[in-house]
Image (spheres, grey):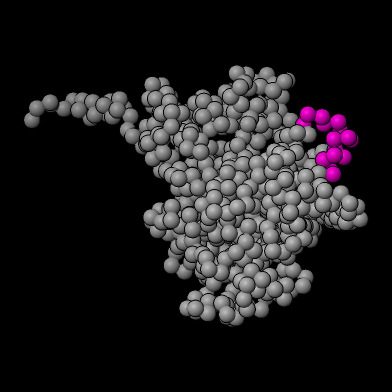
Amino acid sequence: MLVVWSTLLSVGFLSGSGRHALHSELRGQRGFSRGLRAAAYSADAASSDEGCDLDARAALCTYDRAAINARFRDEPLEVAGRLASVAVAVARVNLAHDEGATLRAELSRLGPVFCKVGQTMATRPDIIGLETSRNLGQLQDAIAPEADGPAVAMRTLAEALGRPIEDCLMEVSPEPVAAASLAEVYKARLVSDGRAVAVKIQRPGLERKVALDFYVLGKLLELAQRRFNIGKDVEQIVAVLDEVGNGIFAELDFEIEAQSITSFRQMYAKQLDSLGVVVPEVVGALTSTRVLVTEWIDGTPPRDLAPTERQRLARIAVRCLAMQLMTDGFIHCDPHEGNLLALPDGRVALLDFGLMAQMRTDHQEAMAHGVLNIIAENYLALEEVFRGMGVLDASKTDLRRPGVEEPFSDAIERCMTGGAADAPDADPAASSRKKLVQGDDGADRRRAFGQLYEELSELAFRYYFTIPSYYILVMRSFVTLEGIALSADPDDSFNMYQATAPYARRKLLTPRTAGGRALLRAAFFSRDGRKALRTGLRLPNPWRSLRQRLRRWRGKPLLT
C-alpha cells in the first residue's frame, strides 16, 4: 500500500489540478478540438475518444482510464513482463548499497513515469538522504538516450515537419545534447536565417509506455485493495491516479508547452527584463505535438558554477518565482538544476515549460499574508491565513483528526518554533528524522522554507488538510531553489521569506478578492496584525519613534 501511495503522490506532485484547467485554456486559445478530461472519468468523455489508438504515431491521445484498461486487458504477457521489470528493479535496488546510484539507473530504465517519481524525490534529502538525493538529481538532465540512437529521433522529426529535415534545419548535432524522461534535445541551425536552435524531440512510443505503466499501477491498486482492505480510500487513490494520468498525457503535447512559453514571455516581459531572466523564444513554424523548436541559449548549469555565482543564480531564480507567485500567478513549476543556466552577462535562463500551474487570486493574497506573518512571528494568524489559502478543510470547525489532542493553532506555533515532530502524539519516526535543511540545534527555523514544508507534511497526517494540488508544485519549486541556494551558502545568509517579502507586500496592499480584503482588515484591527504589517512593510513603530524622540529631547530646551 505504501508503494502505491508513494508512487501516485510523488508523480501527483508533478501534475496538479491547477495545471489541467490551465492546459484546457491554452488548448482553447489555439482552437484545439482535443480537450483535457477532468480527473473523474465519465461515460460521455469516454465515447469521444473511442477512435484513439495508443499505438498510432499520427494522433495524440488524451488520458482515458477506461480505454487504457480495455487496451491492456487482453495483453497478459505484456502486463506480466512490465510487472516483472518493476519487480526486478525493486530487487536490484534492495540488494544495492550505493546511496542511490542503482536506484537512479533503475528508474531511468523503467521510463518516464518512474523517472518523474525519482525527480520529485530528489528534492527531498530529508526523506531519502543527501547522497541518494544527489544521485537522483542526475535524473533531471542525464537520462540515457534511446537505444536505437538518433535515427529514431530523426524519423520522428521528419514526420513532425512533414518534409525533409534539410529543408528546415542544418548542422543538426549527431547525438542529443541532453536527454530527459520525455524527450531528447538536439542542437541545430535554421536554414532560413542561420539562428542556433534547440530541437526537443519526443521519445518514441511514449503514449503506449505511459499507458501501460498506469494500467500496471491500477492493477497494483486492486491488489492493495484486496490485500489491505483499504475500502473507502480507493476512490481517493483512483482520483489521484486519474489526475496524474491527465497531467502526464498533457505534458506529451509540446504545443501546450510552446503556448506556455509564449504566454510567459508576454505576461512577464517587463519583470523578466528587470530581474535579468531570459526565456527562449519559440519557433512556432517548426513546432508540433511531438517536436518543440526554441532559440538556443548558451550558459553554465548551476552545479558547474563557483559557490558565489551559484548562490547568485539561485537568488535571481527565487525572486523570479516569487514574482510569478505574487503577480499573475502563472508559474513555472520545474526550476531544477537542469532547467537553469547562468549566462556570461550575469543573467539567468529559465528552460522547459512543460510543468506549469495557475494560482487562484484569493490563494495568492492569503499566501502573501502568510509570508509576512511568518516574518513577524505572528503565528496565531496562520490558521486563518491557511483557511484563506484553501489549505484547511473549511467544513471542519475542529481540525484535529481522531486521536489528536493538540489544537491546530498550538501545533502551527510549535511547527514554526519547535517542530511538528516534537508533539506528544507525533510519530516517533518523525522525531528521529535528521533535519538536513537546517543545523542540528534548530536555530532560526523560520529561515528554512524546506523545514516548514517538512513540518507541514507531518501536520497533514494529524489534521484535516485539503491541500490544492498545485500548491505541491509551488512548494516543491521553492524547496528546490532553496536547496540550490543553501548548497552554496557558507555564511548561512540566505532567507527564502525575505527574498519573497517584497512581492508579498505589493500583493498584500492591493487585494482584488473579498477574502484578501478581509485578511487586510483583520490585520489592521489586531495588535499582532499591525505588527505583521509594520514588519512586512518595513514601517517604523510610531510609539517607539515617539519615545525615541522624547528621549533625545529630554534635558534640552524646547526653544532656541
- Asked if residue 226 is among those painted magenta in the image, a careful observer would answer yes
Say whether residue 376 is visible.
no
Q: Position of residue 131 (x, y in %)?
A: 71, 54
Residue 304, quarter of the rendered image: bottom right
Q: Nearer the viewer, residue 135 or 518?
A: 518
Q: Is residue 250 left or right of residue 299?
A: right
Residue 555 in view: yes
How far across and how far down the image is residue 518, in percent? Answer: 43, 26
Task: From the image, give the main secondary structure of the stretch colored magenta.
Answer: helix
Position of residue 55 relative to residue 37, above or below, is below
Q: Residue at x 66, y 57 (%)?
A: 252
Whether 317 is among the magenta residues is: no
- Residue extending farthest to the left is 560
In the visual, does 259 lie left or right of 82?
Answer: left
Q: Residue at x 16, y 27 (%)?
A: 556
Q: Is residue 347 left or right of residue 155?
A: left
From the viewer's side, name the closer residue of 107 and 501.
107
Q: Residue at x 77, y 70 (%)?
A: 147
Quadrant in which the N terminus is drawn: top right
Q: Can you say whether 201 is above or below 320 in the image?
A: below
Residue numbers of the magenta segment: 219-233
- Residue 114, percent across and down? 75, 53
- The quadrant the C terminus occupies is top left
The image position of residue 358, as x and y in percent, is 53, 44
| Depth check, front residue: 151 or 50 | 50
